[in-house]
Image (cartoon, rainbow, N blue to C red):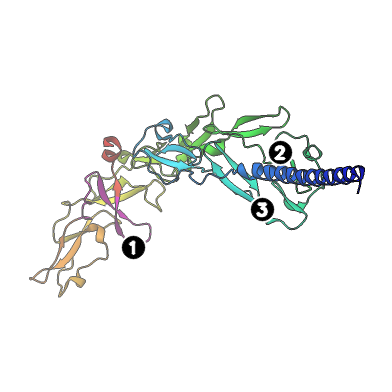
Amino acid sequence: MNLETTRAQLGFWILATLLAIGATGCGLLLDLQNADAEAGLDAEVPTDASAPDPTDPLPATCTEDAECDDDRYCTGIELCVGGRCVHRNQPMCDDGVECTADGCNEDLDACVHRPRRELCGSGEVCFPNNGCGPGRPCQRDEECDDGAFCSGEEMCLDGLCQPGLPVACPSSGCLEGICDEAKDECATEPSDAFCDDGLSCTVDACRASTGECSHLRLSNRCDDGFGCTNDGCSPEHPLADGATGCIHTPDDSVCNGSDDSCFELVCASAPGSATGCAPQFKPDFCSSDEICDSTTGACEPGSEACTNDGDCDDGNPCNGIEKCTAERQCETEFASCPPPMDSCFDSYCDLSSGAPMCEERPTLICFEAL
């Protein structure tokens, strides 16, 4: 073998080695690019495992919504309802697409949805809006760009175009984050639904200028149909209806009870009554051997003879409890319904079911004192 032959063979092996290294290097570079792209997609994990618990305690009492705000998006809007802070309208982040990982991200103040291509079949990719579908072949990221801002940045991965992560636009208060495709930017728009306090006597709205909720009170939504009550929308009042926010202040003067009757009429919002008035028996009007007639208002003689309490019972607990005395005569113990334990309530007789029953009602003192 001469020197020239040796040089030629050496040059051939050097060239072959360089080509082999170059081919391997390109393969490694391509693999690293793909790995980086895949890592970049997976690194933008949108769900927030440490999202705050909406059951975290809020201030016990309040007079306005601002006192309840916990400055967190994922717990929803905090409202002052009936003098108490409550969470309302927590973000519902489930998009219904099986191949996306959905969650609430407190840093972004938004719901986010990460496509998970591993949940799709061979040759498929995860489309954030539609789920799994055939992927479009590609060699470069540029071939995958759909030209839309709001759909995120598409990339070529493993020879298929991968959809981007949809742009998550932050919300602020009751201003809902939206993606404005025409301007290629995030924006907000007021959402009245975020401000719903669940009360029927309020009209809830989101102020576009501040992102704060307003609750217009409409007393005409509180009409209970009874002429003896003054109806109003006062959700913060302790006696307000929890579902409506309404209060119904009684006005006994509308009922016009008679002075010469053994019962008087009081405003009790009584079912079955056109005015809401119901009888309230006067404790000392009838004598112990008389019974108050709940129909006529007259004191009627009790049974003259009896052998047990059952002989004396007139079936009306509202006008007292009739007892048979040792002398075998009927007498009335307690001349009316027993008084409630709470001093701002009193008793009345509910006749709506046909069988008289003692019930309790809040008096005007309750509404004025609280």
Q: Relative to 326, is 141 above or below?
A: above
What percent of the width, then of the height, locates residue 100? 64, 50
- CB of mark 2 within 8 Å of CB of mark 3? no
**Mark 2: few, some, or many residues within 10 Å (few <14, many ≥20)?**
some
SS at mark 1?
loop
Nearest the viewer among 67 and 44 is 44
Q: Residues within 10 Å of mark 3 (few under 14, many from 20)?
A: many
- Give percent across and percent down for residue 338: 21, 55
Q: Which one is nearer the viewer's eye here, 168 or 281?
A: 168
Q: Helix, strand or loop at disc 2?
A: loop
**Mark pair 1, 2: CA separation:** 68 Å
Q: Which residue is drawn at the image coordinates 30% and 56% (left, top)?
A: 295
Disc 2 designates what residue? Answer: 151
Please indicate, yes or no, whether residue 163 appears anywhere in the rendered image. Answer: no
Per the rendering, the mark at residue 345 is: none
Query: What secondary structure prevails in the magenta region?
Result: loop
Q: Is residue 1 above or below residue 190?
A: below
Q: Nearer the viewer, mark 1 or mark 2?
A: 2
Magenta part of the chain: 336-360
Q: Residues within 10 Å of mark 1 (few under 14, many from 20)?
A: few
Mark 3 lies on residue: 99
Q: x, y (%) of residue 72? A: 47, 37
| 338 in magenta | yes
The residue that label 1 is drawn on is 355
Please say whether residue 314 is visible from this viewpoint. yes
Instruction: Give the residue type that dot 2 points to.
Output: Ser
